[in-house]
Image (spheres, rainbow, N blue to C red):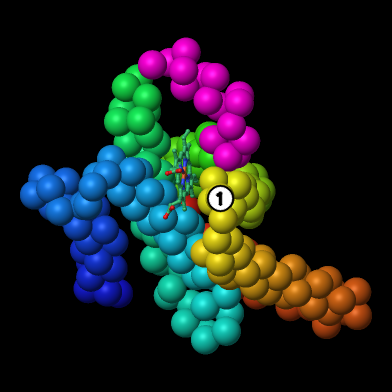
Amino acid sequence: MPLLKFVIFILSLLPFAWYGWGAWHDTLGANPIEAVTRGMGTWTLNFLLITLAVTPLRKLTGWHAALRLRRMLGLFTFFYAVLHLTSYLWFDQFFDWGEIARDILDRPFITVGMAAFVLLIPLAATSSNFAIRKLGGRRWQALHRTVYAIGILAVLHYSWLVKADQSQPLLYGGILVVLLGLRAWWREVERREQLAGKYQPKIRNRIIPIQPRR
Ligand code: HEM
């Protein structure tokens, strides 16, 4: 697992390296600023969906160790979101806070993008073992369920900013529906099993790793 984690860590940095290299060597096309903002936005959404895919992957394959990758993937979502937002604040708006406030109020796709970003902050801030211990497993899990709302806001953000061809936002939306639908389905099955008295608590509620220190 440490080797796999390291490989995924390096792979996750590749989009950053690619856009950094492109910006430095001026190979990002006629509008490099737009290319960087859009590229970082796309990778924020990619990592969000990859993070949301970890639980279904674990359930469908029985590969429980996949959970150990989830925190890192979630933090990469936040990393790319910060770069995406920074690129917008800096290169699009030149840190003109009045203009930025107007943009957030006037353009619905910016409003929902900003909402998604704000909701990501507490998730990134509580990703450490210390925060999990402090909050307690149940409260931590309840807080981290806002990731589902973030997914919906992120797809809306994409769909509302695209003017004509909705194929990409629809593709992302479809993947999100499958990922959230599977969870809803499994929850319903568990609820029914519980009602029928067949329910055995599974690994689902285990947060890795929080072994209390003795
Ligand atoms: C979780 C948060 C966010 C996600 C997942 C996200 C995702 C995306 C995606 C997928 C794109 C389109 C990329 C493409 O066209 O290929 C995009 C574009 C964009 N996003 Fe975000 N975004 C987020 C937050 C924000 C925030 C907070 C802002 C600014 C306040 C913002 C501003 C923009 C802008 C200005 C564009 C480019 C629009 C254009 O070129 O017409 N996004 N974002």
Image quarter of residue 185: bottom right
Q: Is residue 39 left or right of residue 18?
A: right
Measuring from the top left, give residue 124's x and y in whole percent.
Answer: 45, 43
> Magenta residues?
96-112
Q: Amino acid at mark 1?
A: Lys
- Nearer to me, 27 or 55: 27
Q: Is residue 100 found inside the magenta-colored segment of the image?
A: yes
Q: Is residue 135 left or right of residue 70?
A: right
Say above or below: 136 vs 104: below
| CB of mark 1 near ligand 1 (< 8 Å) | no
Q: Residue at point 35% right, 20% down? A: 95
Measuring from the top left, give residue 24's x and y in whole percent.
Answer: 10, 45
Q: Main secondary structure of the magenta part?
A: helix
Question: How many residues crowd mark 1 within 10 Å: few (<14), some (14–19), many (20+)?
Answer: few
Measuring from the top left, give residue 21's x and y in whole percent.
Answer: 13, 52
Give the position of the N terminus as an image quadrant.
bottom left
Under circle 1, the secondary element is: loop
* Residue at the spot of label 1: 163
Q: Is residue 213 visible?
A: no
Say above or below: 47 vs 133: below
Q: Is residue 170 visible?
A: yes
